[in-house]
Image (cartoon, rainbow, N blue to C red):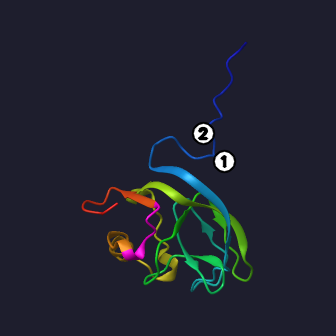
Amino acid sequence: MALETNELFDSASRSNDGRMISRRNMVVTLAAYNPSSGADILLPVGTPLSYDASANKYVVWDTGLRVDAVLYTEKQSDATDDVQCVAMVEGEVHFDALHVPTENGSSSANLKTVLYDVATRSQLLLIKGLPGVQH
């Protein structure tokens, strides 16, 4: 039998570089995302998400919110409608693999502050690459 090209790690699946190791993924509802540009945005893998309990939906993380999940596959946002996406709700992620959503005014420093505090991130997410982060 001839060997075929290994498609295990194609663009539709996660890479094997160890920067994101999922233990549990969920299909979640992502609230309409309308940053200052007002246009739909392609949200890359590693975008932090927060859970909005009042709306029963996930939202793109912004300064002042808790990090509850990480976008596991890239997804085109919609400025007016909710979308379904795959989110990693439990697992390991390296800080360098996280995408800071700067289009809403967030910064890497703000994200680091949130991840350092156990009260503002999910205990199911193990953050690597930040010295002193309690797991």
The reply to whether the C-beta atoms of the residues labelled 2 and 1 are less than 8 Å apart is no
Residue 88: x, y in percent?
56, 59
112 or 134: which is nearer to us? 134
List the single residue furthest toward the left.
132
Real-space CA distance between mark 2 and mark 1, rounded to the nearest whole angstrom: 8 Å
> On the rendered image, what quadrant is the C terminus found in?
bottom left
Residue 71: x, y in percent?
57, 63
Q: Magenta segment range?
A: 119-124
Q: Which residue type does callout 1 highlight?
A: Ala
**Is residue 59 located in the magenta-colored stretch of the structure?**
no
* Residue that mark 2 sits on: 9
* Residue that mark 1 sits on: 12
Question: Mark 1 falls on what kind of element?
Answer: loop
Q: Residues within 10 Å of mark 2 (few under 14, many from 20)?
A: few
In this rendering, would 94 be left or right of 38? Answer: left
Q: Count of labels shown?
A: 2
